[in-house]
Image (spheres, helix red, strand yellow):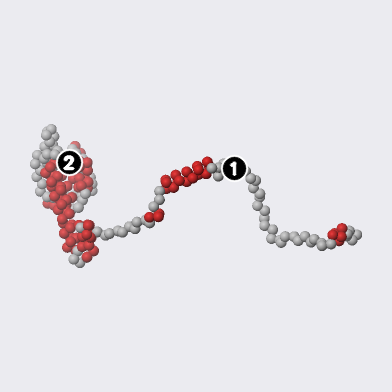
Amino acid sequence: MSSRLRRSRGRPPRKRGERPTIRRKDLPVVRLPGQTRSQGGKTKLTNRRAAIILHAIGCGCYRETAAELAGVKAETLSHWMGWSGDPYETFQGLVRKAEADLEARMVRIITEQAEVRPELALAILERKFPQRWAKVSVVAAPPQHLNFNVADILQKVQERIAQQHAQGQLPPATIINASVKPNRPHDPRPPRLTVVSSNPAEDNEPGPT
């Protein structure tokens, strides 16, 4: 029987490119005790899945990414890290050790480069000893005369308005509906001059006919 017929009857083959190929020789040797649940069912936490997760964490991956590489959900890995009993407690210790080894390896790489790059040494001191080496940010306090409370100011204004109303100093508000005159264009000509005679008799004389 050909391999194509055997594949068609059983489980469909996994598509290529879904997950990166992890070589067996790159995985750590993991032997978890008690890989059976108390109810009798077999757990998904196998030695191979545990080895893949530990290898991914050692390479710098997050736990969620390591779970994806192992073919399980991130929630499943979270459950494994919280359940009691074996193989979970042994697995939890291996995960914490893998994370500690990664941190120690990264710190060693940075400290080795600190001799040629002093800014790395200063960054390490700022994070390791923040009480003595962290950058100090000085924030100037606001002047004392600017310290005021808006609620108090509004309350004082309302009290003063009520007091003036009681003393009759503020008349009731009225609305004046005044007509608005249309805007006339500006006349550039000068105003007309009216000539007034100083002799009233000349004003009464009839003009020439």
Query: Is residue 116 placed above or below 89 in the rendered structure?
Result: below
Q: Residue at x 15, y 52 (%)?
A: 100
Q: Could you tell me the amino acid type at mark 1?
A: Ile
Find residue 98 and report its horizontal and vertical position in percent.
Answer: 15, 50
Find residue 199 and report its horizontal and vertical position in percent.
Answer: 84, 62
Q: Could you tell me the amino acid type at mark 2?
A: Gly
The answer to whether residue 23 is seen in the rendering is no
Residue positioned most to the top: 39
Badge 1 marks a residue whose secondary structure is loop
For marks 1 and 2, the one nearer the N-term is 2
Q: Residue at x 13, y 50 (%)?
A: 97
Left or right: where does residue 164 sit relative to residue 69? right
Q: Residue at x 64, y 47 (%)?
A: 180
Location of mark 1 (residue): 175
169 or 1: nearer the viewer: 169
The answer to whether residue 197 is seen in the rendering is yes
6 or 199: nearer the viewer: 199
Of labels 1 and 2, the one closer to you: 1
67 or 195: nearer the viewer: 195
**Quarter of the figure that contains the N terminus:** top left
Residue at mark 1 to residue at mark 2: CA–CA distance: 74 Å
**Label 1 packing within 10 angstroms: few (<14), some (14-19), many (20+):** few
Numbered marks: total = 2
Find residue 144 and report its image quarter: bottom left
Residue positioned most to the front: 167
Find residue 148 and report its horizontal and vertical position in percent.
Answer: 40, 50
**Quarter of the figure that contains the C terminus:** bottom right
Q: Residue at x 18, y 50 (%)?
A: 57
* CB contact under 8 Å: marks 1 and 2: no
Left or right: where does residue 71 sit relative to residue 206? left
Badge 2 marks a residue whose secondary structure is loop
Location of mark 2 (residue): 82
